[in-house]
Image (cartoon, rainbow, N blue to C red):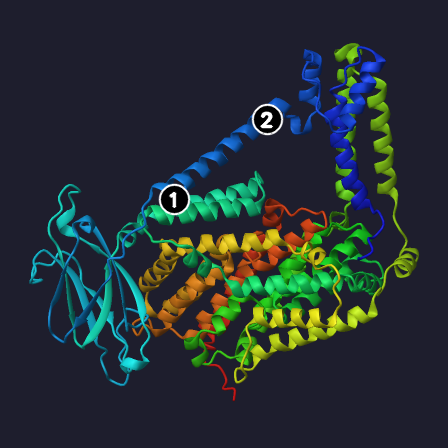
């Protein structure tokens, strides 16, 4: 097992806070009717047992409870708030259970239709689906976009569908739906699903249900599958409910009412219940398909490798080495770590990078009395910035560059770096100078600030207890309270004054920490080198690339073959299961929001705004909208589903003959917006959540608010710098066409 560092100021401060809280909650309950009663009650409380139910507190002790309790909140009010929380969670549980029990699964009413050229085919709409909004789902050899694309002077064939009040299709009650067909041969086409909602002018009265028909025509013989779907018609009504579920999840995470993993599971289940209530035929296979298994497998495999590597002592060794090269100075140490994290994250995806570097940062902070949560936050920020350099640095970049249309239009590994590295360099410098200004007082980087706060808080509490002791009379042990308070104050002040000298600390660290198992380190280094080689193979498009998750899993299997693992269950206990469950729940929630159209409507609004301005300003507006929308949306919705949502919009805008926008500036705007937007909140990027999980494993808790206070302003300044860079390169100098790489 990895040797633990000795007790440091951080750990003593945390330990003192725990003892201090126990002391406050116990000391106010003393009943000094006689010494024996006091000793019995005190020992019972110190052992963590319940109070005697017949030992009712007096008014004086109730008053002391209120004044001496944390944050000035009475214990009875805490119980009331906890009861309200439990009641609210039970109500949510009841809503989920009732919806899932009483809602019947919809019957599949799909029909196959073979359409002949220039002939009308009609289908009577079932009466239960006749309403002001009529939704349909169709499958067929359709193009992905609904825009007419004329290639080589050939106009594509089209299927036209509308709603009519007569079987002949002459009295139309809605606008036509035009769906263009693929030009490939029948055996080469792919089936595409389309959804559409008709606004029916004949059914504005909810009680009136006229007989309506779907009318279909085509310019080419084609077979399609069609279903009139209540869910499609009603899903827009579920957008508000979906938004409320998202707000609820963020409220629970921000206020820390319950653990963020439990909050995500609860909200994901509530979102699935929303889909069921809207009439969607949800099943377990469908839900599992929403989870990004590739990302989950990558996280699981790298967590296993990191857990095994920690036993070799390599993390302690790197912590000592970083301390040695920085000569004990904070900013040289922080600069080297940030630069190292940013550079390596460009070539090793930032999730893996944080899995590697987070244990080192925590060891180093404990040795130097630095704030581990703050240091990890800074490393995460630089990891997300550096990952924007290459197509393999961040999952959003991988999603973008693996798109067939983007790859076929000249977005390669070298071209990606050529356009993104200058911008990332500027953002890195801007972030560094901003952090130097924010933390110009180095004491803010140390844990001393927390110790000072603890001393002041304890001093105020001791003073209040002393003043109220006389009011409580003989029922309160004044001497005991004063003695414990003075002892705690003296201990904290000694820790605050203790400033270790660099040579002595370095010698002490070198004597205690180093490589403990060199054979294990060599074996696992081989495994990591193999995995890294597979990761870098994504830079070469002519090679067969193994997906990142499977590449990491093959490294784990190689480690199992090389290393003799005697206790596999103990190894599994070191996996961050809560982080994996959080990711899975987040994927499900975001997919539900996409299915009800909440995410897609963002892209539609972006396209509508661009069409409102003059042609010469469209490129500038398109770049700004894609950059800022993807960044802000990524901050609150996670950058992976936002990238998956925005990518078809970018492709559609580049293909639109009316807009006439170049593809490459839109791609760079999306890539950097999604990566830099990952710094906005704690749940905005995978690396953020992973780092929080590792910190929690070591006893340090990430706060959503503390991350937001630092990360969101940095994200905004990053996007401002990126906006200026993109305008300068692509609007002023029109640097659109990439160089050709063989």
Q: Which residue is pictured at 17% across the width and 60% down the height?
A: 175
Which residue is at 78% across, 39% downward?
A: 15
Is residue 546 positioned above or below 645 on the image? below
- 116 left or right of 88 in image: left
- Which residue bears the numbered disc 1? 100
Whether residue 109 sits left or right of residue 76 in the image: it is left
Graded by Cα atoms within 10 Å as few (under 14), some (14 to 19) or many (20 or more), the crowding at tag 2 reads few
Q: Earlier in the sequence, mark 1 or mark 2?
A: 2
In depth, the one of 27 and 557 nearer the eye is: 557
Kind of element beneath mark 2: helix
Any part of residue 680 in sight: no
Q: Does residue 272 appear in the picture of this structure?
A: yes
In this rendering, position of residue 473 left or right of residue 196: right
Q: Position of residue 303 (x, y in %)?
A: 66, 61
Left or right of residue 193, residue 460 in this image:
right
User: Which residue does the image show at 53% across and 32% down from the upper left?
Assistant: 86
Q: Which of 510 and 187 is in front in this view?
A: 187
Residue corresponding to mark 2? 79
């Amino acid at each position: 097992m990895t040797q633990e560092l000795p007790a440091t100021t951080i750990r003593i401060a945390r330990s003192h806070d725990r003892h201090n809280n126990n002391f406050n909650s116990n000391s106010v309950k003393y009943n000094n009717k006689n010494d024996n009663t006091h000793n019995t009650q005190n020992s019972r409380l110190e052992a963590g047992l319940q109070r005697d139910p017949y030992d009712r507190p007096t008014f004086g002790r109730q008053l002391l409870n209120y004044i001496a309790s944390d944050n000035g909140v009475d214990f009875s009010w805490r119980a009331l708030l906890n009861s309200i929380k439990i009641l609210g969670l039970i109500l949510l549980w009841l809503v989920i259970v009732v919806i899932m029990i009483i809602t019947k699964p919809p019957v599949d009413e799909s029909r196959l239709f073979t359409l002949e050229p220039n002939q009308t085919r009609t289908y009577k709409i079932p009466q239960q689906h006749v309403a002001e909004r009529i939704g349909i789902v169709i499958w067929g050899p359709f193009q992905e976009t609904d825009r007419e694309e004329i290639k080589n002077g050939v106009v594509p064939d089209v299927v036209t569908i509308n709603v009519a009040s007569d079987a002949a299709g002459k009295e139309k009650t809605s606008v036509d739906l035009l769906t263009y067909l693929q030009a490939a041969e029948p055996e080469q086409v792919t089936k595409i699903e389309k959804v559409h909602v008709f606004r029916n002018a004949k059914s504005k009265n909810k009680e009136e249900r006229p007989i309506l028909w779907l009318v279909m025509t085509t310019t080419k013989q084609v077979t399609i599958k069609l279903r009139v779907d209540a869910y499609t018609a009603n899903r827009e009504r579920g957008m508000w409910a979906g938004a409320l579920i998202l707000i609820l999840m963020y409220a629970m995470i921000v206020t820390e009412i319950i653990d963020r993993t439990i909050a995500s599971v609860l909200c994901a289940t509530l979102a699935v219940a929303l889909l069921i209530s809207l009439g969607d035929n949800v099943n377990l296979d469908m839900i599992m398909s929403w989870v990004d298994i590739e990302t989950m497998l990558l996280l699981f495999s790298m967590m296993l490798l990191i857990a095994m590597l920690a036993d070799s002592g390599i993390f302690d060794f790197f912590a000592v080495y970083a301390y040695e090269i920085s000569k004990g100075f904070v900013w040289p140490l922080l600069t080297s770590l940030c630069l190292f994290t940013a550079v390596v994250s460009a070539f090793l995806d930032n999730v893996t990078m944080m899995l590697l570097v987070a244990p080192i940062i925590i060891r180093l902070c404990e040795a130097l009395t630095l704030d581990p949560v703050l240091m990890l936050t800074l490393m995460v920020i630089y990891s997300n910035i550096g990952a924007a350099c290459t197509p393999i640095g961040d999952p959003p970049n991988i999603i973008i560059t693996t798109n067939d249309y983007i790859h076929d239009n000249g977005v390669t590994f070298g071209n990606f770096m050529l356009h993104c590295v200058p911008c990332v360099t500027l953002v890195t410098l801007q972030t560094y100078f901003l952090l130097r200004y924010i933390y110009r007082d180095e004491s803010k980087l140390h844990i001393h600030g927390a110790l000072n706060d603890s001393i002041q808080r304890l001093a105020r509490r001791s003073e209040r207890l002393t003043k109220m002791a006389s009011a409580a009379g003989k029922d309160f042990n004044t001497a005991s309270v004063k003695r414990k308070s003075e002892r705690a104050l003296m201990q904290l002040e000694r820790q605050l004054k203790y400033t270790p000298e660099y040579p002595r600390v370095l010698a002490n660290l070198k004597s205690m920490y180093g490589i403990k198992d060199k054979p294990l380190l060599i074996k696992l280094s081989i495994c990591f080198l193999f995995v890294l080689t597979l990761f870098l193979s994504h830079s070469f498009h002519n090679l067969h690339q193994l997906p990142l998750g499977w590449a990491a899993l093959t490294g784990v299997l190689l480690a199992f073959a090389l290393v003799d693992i005697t206790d596999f269950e103990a190894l599994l206990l070191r996996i961050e299961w809560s982080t994996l469950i959080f990711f899975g729940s987040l994927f499900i929630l975001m997919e539900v929001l996409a299915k009800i159209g909440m995410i897609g409507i963002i892209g539609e609004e972006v396209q509508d705004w661009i069409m409102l301005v003059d042609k010469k300003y469209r490129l500038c507006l398109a770049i700004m909208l894609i950059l800022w929308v993807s960044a802000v949306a990524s901050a609150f919705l996670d950058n992976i589903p936002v990238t998956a949502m925005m990518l078809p919009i970018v492709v559609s805008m580049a293909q639109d003959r009316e807009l006439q926008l170049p593809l490459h500036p839109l791609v760079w705007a999306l890539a950097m917006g999604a990566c830099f937007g990952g710094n906005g909140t704690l749940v905005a990027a995978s690396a953020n959540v992973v780092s929080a999980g590792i910190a929690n494993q070591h006893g340090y808790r990430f706060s959503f608010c503390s991350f937001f206070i630092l990360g969101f302003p940095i994200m905004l300044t990053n996007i401002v710098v990126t906006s200026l860079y993109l305008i300068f390169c692509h609007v002023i100098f029109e640097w659109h066409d990439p160089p050709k790489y063989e």
